[in-house]
């Protein structure tokens, strides 16, 4: 598997990386999606800007009301962070389920969301967590609400010459009561269906709720039908079951070699139920 | 020194696990060039023109060859001939090294690019402009034989390579079925598998002008046969001018038995450009061009009398051979499949009718088990299904139909209705032991209790037999083999008593460097450190038929034993001379000859030194201590076993979890129990992979839609429980070690056990489905419950 030739550029800072980025270049972080695509010549960038050695992208910072995870932090590091596990268990859970050990040790959260594979775990989980994506560009930096970040099939709000620096996840009561469940595609171990849910309950009733899916549609999405059905309710097997039937409302459900549209829709409801039953 | 029967750690592992292995792609030769093969993106297309001019002038490119450059060279041949039922010769279209007028599967070789680096060769291939006229493809073998289907080869009407039958006259089988109390019938597919050896295929062709010799380094299971085919059938090069070398090979599973076009191409082109050429497959090429396995469409009927005794078996199979005939392809669905349909049972009437079919897909050939897994799947699915339909216990149904135990020495072998004569067996023994181990007595109750709690548990059985150690040359010759199937060995004792063993068997994961050395060291009574195994080099080893069909120890090991016996016989003459005794008065033990009843002795190393420094030496005896042997077995060997799977099904998702897997196998005597256990584990994993995960999928246009590890699900350790493995021992009566072969047993036995367990779970929960297509994906199982 031989990629087309490309220029390799190693950046030591985010600003340097931005200045290095040519119009046909790609950013190399963990490389776990990019390199295979290049080996298959599905992707033939003229240059790779390697940001994997930029230390500032590898920090996990506790901001009192939120946790910032650097774009270059590996899935394994996230999975093993005790603060993340305490304040936002679905983040740890998702990180520990990505790919295999090799992928978790090298793949990064920033790389994953920039690639925006609809079956990847991070997009759904970050949607459920109400995260903010912080992006650097030549002018400085900007913030994008996660709800506005994923714009389509492998498409994001990221512009040319921009680099994700970190994602910021609030330490909300909902995130403290969250989980991620996943039905894996047996070859790649991407999600056929991934469901992340975060629920804040006050006096037993749902005060706030975010439920999101990846693997189901051509983009990760929030299942507002489920959220609306359960808002202000006391969770029960019955109302979870009936809410879960809204898992794919308004969604163009994917149909592929591993799961038909019908089966995938069914699984989305099953996994919504399984996630919510834990919370 | 006693080594036979001991779990000696594998000698080769230190080299292999520390990255010191020497694989074909590791070899560097001064002046080495690199080849890339441009392959067809279409399953069927006419080639209207090829423009290589841009590629030829690209940086670093040495040569670009297309099919018309090598016209006059025959393609790669097949090594087995099967005739039509009416006696006509099978259709044997050419398999060209590079196509000329048309491509016949995705991955068919269109052009060979040779450059200074592999990157340059790869880049230049993108510059070749091929004008294709894309045609409709014949992909599904059952559709391909219908009138009007696209033809893969003009001279094979209805895409039929041959038809074939075996067993009792079909009228007798029909009559027996007509009288049957119950008939279980099943239509099913034994799906196509991709072998997926971890090392991609690789070949280096090196022509040297100074002595007019060629060296082919290649990742083969079969160096001597490759040389024979390459020289005598493809390129017409004198065989003594060619050396074929395969050092370490990273797994084969059958896919590296065959002589491939790339091997001939690099040898041919090396002479053209007068430089060595290396070609190594990309993983995508491995998926597209390593010969695939299985791919049968079958309709089968098994008849029973009122007591559950089998009265007849009737089988119709369509076997997909792909676009071209690979080396052993015609033998696999016929002589390695039809001949196994007796199974372990006394079924008196058996008939198989088979059509072997060309399609616009990659070639299909032997893959771990080769025909025998298909036969076992057919029989064992029918038996478990019959038990469900007749409301009988599947273990009991097997017991009343088993062939009674026979040792093959004082009791004769068992003559089947389908050509073979089993050597020895104790089939009740393996089943009883497996039932005990799995705790069958208590399982049915646990199953009912689980069901009451909404949990779907199932148990599945598979009791199998296989034919290994392929086989007496005269027999396989009568069946259409174009080669003998013996093995050669040479045991060379050096003057200092150190021993080099040369074998025509080939180790690519099996552990021969340990097992074979154990045999020799044990028989000679010397330390294993004093013995080395040499294999995989046609200049070093006299001849060989390679490793496949679980034949190495039974055939290659037997050849080694013959040479060791000759060494000891001659050594005794030298010892007797030195000890001034008669040969009959000597005992040989612990590496020395001793005069019976005395303490007079002479060590092995002193005898070997005498053999090479023959100053004081028996008159008339030749110097030296070095013997070659050829061993041609008198029969196949017949390992057998009982596999039991317990599964749980998630009713909401259809996901099957394998809870337990018990395998009790009988592979005859065992030299190294640890290695045998490893072979069983690996085989079982591969067999379960077929049942639950694997399967090559071609779409209607002939594109392989899951040709990558992102899409083709290979089994991983966490897909399995810890296997529970045991053995019984029924020695092979016809080879000196009493061994039967263990390489394929796990794959052959395991697949139907898993599928049967899922079907059992579903029936017990009220879903009376007869079949779910393999692999048993969650969606297929869920659909079976929700239809």
Image (tube, coloured by chain):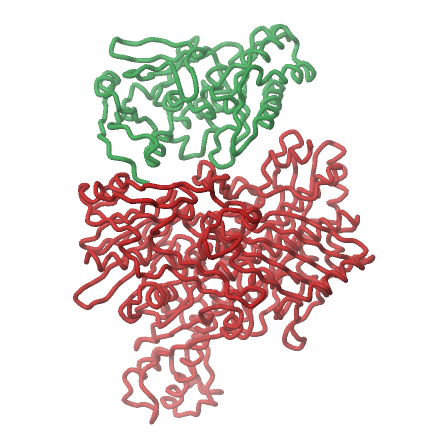
Chain colours: A green, B red
Q: Is residue B615 above or below residue B83?
A: below
- Looking at the image, the residue that sits furthest to the front is B148
Q: Residue at x 62, y 38 (%)?
A: B656
Horizontal placement of B111 versus B338: left or right?
A: left
Q: Residue B306, position in %: x, y?
A: 83, 57
Which residue extends farthest right? B306
Q: Could you say which is closer to the camera, residue B86 or residue B599?
A: B86
- Give the image location of residue B425, x and y in percent: 65, 67
Image quarter where the N terminus of chain B lies is bottom left
Please tell me which residue is depicted at 46% across the width and 34% down the height of the picture: A188
Image point (67%, 65%), residue name: B426
The x, y position of residue B372, in whole percent, is 57, 58
Screen quadrant of the C terminus of chain B: top right
Residue B615 visible (yes or no): yes
Horizontal and vertical percent position of residue B532: 36, 67
Of B57 and A18, which appears nearest the observer? Answer: B57
Above-or-below relation of B62 to B244: above
């Amino acid at each position: 598997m031989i990629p087309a030739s490309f220029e390799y550029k190693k950046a030591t800072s985010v600003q340097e990386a931005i200045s290095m980025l040519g119009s046909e270049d790609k950013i190399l972080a963990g490389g776990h999606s990019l390199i295979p695509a290049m080996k298959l010549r599905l992707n033939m960038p003229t240059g790779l800007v390697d940001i994997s050695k930029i230390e500032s992208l590898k920090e996990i910072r506790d901001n009192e009301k939120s946790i910032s995870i650097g774009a270059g932090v590996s899935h394994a590091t996230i999975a093993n962070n005790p603060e993340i596990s305490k304040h936002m268990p679905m983040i740890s859970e998702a990180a520990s389920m990505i790919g295999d050990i090799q992928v978790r040790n090298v793949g990064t959260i920033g790389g994953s969301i920039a690639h925006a594979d609809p079956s990847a775990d991070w997009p759904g989980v970050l949607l459920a967590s109400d995260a903010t994506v912080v992006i650097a560009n030549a002018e400085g930096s900007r913030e994008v609400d996660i709800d506005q970040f994923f714009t389509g099939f492998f498409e994001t709000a990221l512009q040319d010459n921009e680099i994700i620096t970190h994602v910021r996840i609030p330490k909300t009561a909902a995130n403290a009561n969250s989980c991620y469940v996943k039905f894996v595609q047996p070859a790649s171990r991407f999600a056929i269906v991934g469901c992340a849910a975060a629920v804040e309950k006050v006096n037993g009733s749902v005060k706030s709720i975010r439920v999101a899916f990846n693997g189901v549609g051509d983009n990760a999405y929030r299942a507002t039908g489920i959220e609306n059905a359960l808002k202000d309710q006391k969770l029960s097997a019955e109302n979870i079951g009936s809410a879960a039937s809204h898992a794919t409302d308004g969604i163009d459900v994917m149909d592929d070699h591993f799961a038909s549209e019908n089966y995938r829709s069914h699984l989305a409801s099953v996994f919504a139920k399984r996630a919510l039953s834990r919370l | 020194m006693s080594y036979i029967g001991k779990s000696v750690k594998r000698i080769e592992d230190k080299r292999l696990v520390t990255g010191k292995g020497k694989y074909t792609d590791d070899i560097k030769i001064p002046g080495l060039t690199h080849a890339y093969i441009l392959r067809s993106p279409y399953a069927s297309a006419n080639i209207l023109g090829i423009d290589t001019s841009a590629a030829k002038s690209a940086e670093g490119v040495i040569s670009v060859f297309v099919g018309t450059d090598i016209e006059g060279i025959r393609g790669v041949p097949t090594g087995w001939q099967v005739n039509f039922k009416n006696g006509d010769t099978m259709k044997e279209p050419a398999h060209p090294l590079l196509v000329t007028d048309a491509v016949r599967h995705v991955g068919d070789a269109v052009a060979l690019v040779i450059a200074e680096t592999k990157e340059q060769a790869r880049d230049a291939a993108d510059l070749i402009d091929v004008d294709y006229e894309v045609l409709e493809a014949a992909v599904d073998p059952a559709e391909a034989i219908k009138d009007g289907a696209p033809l893969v080869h003009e001279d094979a009407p209805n895409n039929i390579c041959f038809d074939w039958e075996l067993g009792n006259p079909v009228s007798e089988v029909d009559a027996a079925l007509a009288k049957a109390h119950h008939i279980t019938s099943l239509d099913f597919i034994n799906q196509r598998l991709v072998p997926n050896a971890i090392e991609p295929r690789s070949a280096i062709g090196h022509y040297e002008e100074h002595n007019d010799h060629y060296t082919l380094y290649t990742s083969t299971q079969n160096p001597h046969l490759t040389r024979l085919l390459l020289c005598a059938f493809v390129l017409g090069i004198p065989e003594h001018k060619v050396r074929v070398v395969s050092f370490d090979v990273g797994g084969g599973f059958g896919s590296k038995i065959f002589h491939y076009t790339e091997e001939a191409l690099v040898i041919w082109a090396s002479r053209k450009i007068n430089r060595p050429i290396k070609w190594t497959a990309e993983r995508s090429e491995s998926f597209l061009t390593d010969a695939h396995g299985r791919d049968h469409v079958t309709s089968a009927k098994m008849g029973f009398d009122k007591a559950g005794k089998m009265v007849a078996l009737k089988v119709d199979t369509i076997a997909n051979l792909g676009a071209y005939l690979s080396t052993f392809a015609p033998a696999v669905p016929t002589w390695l499949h039809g001949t196994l349909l007796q199974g372990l049972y006394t079924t008196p009437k058996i008939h198989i009718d088979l059509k072997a079919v060309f399609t616009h897909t990659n070639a299909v050939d032997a893959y771990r088990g080769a025909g025998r897994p298909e036969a076992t799947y057919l029989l064992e699915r029918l038996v478990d299904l019959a038990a469900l339909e007749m409301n009988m216990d599947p273990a009991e149904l097997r017991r009343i139909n088993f062939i009674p135990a026979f040792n093959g020495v004082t009791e004769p072998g068992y003559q089947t209705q389908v050509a073979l004569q089993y050597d020895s067996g104790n089939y009740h023994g393996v089943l009883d032991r497996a039932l005990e181990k799995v705790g069958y007595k208590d399982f049915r109750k646990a199953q009912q209790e689980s069901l009451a709690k909404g949990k779907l548990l199932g148990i599945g059985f598979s009791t199998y037999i296989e034919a290994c150690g392929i086989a007496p040359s005269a027999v396989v010759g009568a069946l259409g083999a174009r080669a003998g199937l013996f093995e050669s060995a040479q045991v060379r004792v050096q003057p200092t008593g150190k021993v080099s063993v040369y074998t025509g068997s080939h180790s690519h994961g099996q552990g021969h460097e340990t097992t074979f050395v154990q045999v020799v060291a044990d028989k000679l009574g010397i330390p294993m450190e004093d013995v080395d195994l040499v294999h995989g080099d046609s200049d070093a080893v006299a001849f060989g038929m390679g490793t496949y069909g679980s034949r190495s120890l039974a055939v290659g090991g037997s050849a080694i034993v013959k040479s060791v016996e000759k060494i000891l016989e001659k050594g005794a003459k030298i010892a007797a001379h030195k000890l001034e005794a008669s040969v009959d008065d000597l005992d040989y033990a612990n590496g020395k000859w001793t005069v019976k009843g005395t303490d007079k002795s002479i060590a092995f190393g002193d005898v070997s030194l005498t053999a090479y420094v023959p100053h004081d030496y028996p008159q008339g005896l030749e110097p030296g201590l070095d013997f070659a042997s050829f061993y041609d077995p008198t029969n196949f060997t017949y390992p057998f076993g009982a596999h039991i799977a317990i599964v749980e099904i998630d009713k909401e998702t259809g996901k099957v979890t394998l809870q337990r897997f018990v395998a009790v196998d009988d592979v005859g005597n065992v030299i190294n129990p640890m290695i045998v256990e490893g072979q069983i584990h690996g085989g079982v994993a591969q067999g379960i992979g077929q049942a639950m995960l694997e399967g090559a999928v071609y779409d209607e246009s002939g594109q392989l839609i899951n040709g990558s590890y992102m899409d083709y699900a290979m089994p991983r350790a966490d897909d399995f429980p810890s296997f529970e493995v045991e053995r019984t021992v029924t020695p092979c009566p016809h080879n000196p070690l009493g061994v039967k072969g263990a390489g394929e047993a796990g794959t052959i036995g395991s697949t139907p056990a898993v599928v049967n367990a899922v079907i059992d779970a579903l029936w017990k929960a009220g879903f009376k489905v007869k079949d779910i297509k393999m692999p048993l994906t969650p969606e297929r199982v869920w659909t079976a419950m929700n239809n």
